Amino acid sequence: MGMNKNTVLAWATWIMIFVGLGMIALGAFKYDEVAGYGFGAVGIGFFAIAWVFNALKGRV
C-alpha cells in the first residue's frame, strides 16, 4: 500500500478529529471541575490542527 503525502494528511486529519472529540468528551463528561475546561480547550486545539492538515491536502 503506497501512501503519498495527501493520504498521510488525510489519516492525520481523521486521527486528530477523533482525539479532539475524545478530549472534549472527557472534559464534558468526566471532569466537572476546572480541568474540564482545559480538556475542552485542548480538544478545540486538535480540531484547529486537523483543519490545517485538511487545508494542506493537495498543496504539499
Image: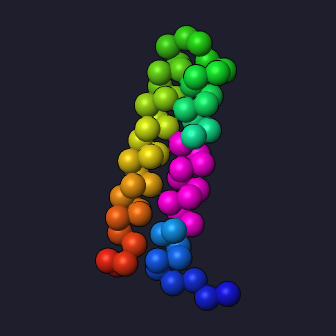
View extreme (left): residue: 59
Q: In which quarter of the image is residue 54?
A: bottom left
Image quadrant holding the N terminus, namely bottom right
Magenta stretch: dominant SS?
helix
Q: Quadrant of residue 22?
A: top right
46 in the magenta segment: no
View extreme (bottom): residue: 2
Image quadrant holding the C terminus, namely bottom left
Residue 18 on image: x %, y %: 60, 48
Is 11 left or right of 56, judged from the image as shown?
Answer: right
Residue at image x 53%, y 76%? 7
The stretch in magenta equals 11-20
Residue at image x 46%, y 36%? 42
Residue 10 on image: x %, y %: 51, 68
Is 38 left or right of 59, judged from the image as shown?
Answer: right
Residue at image x 52%, y 29%? 39
Residue 57 on image: x %, y %: 40, 72
Vertical relation: 38 (above or below) 46: above
Residue 17 on image: x %, y %: 54, 50
Vertical relation: 57 (above or below) 28: below
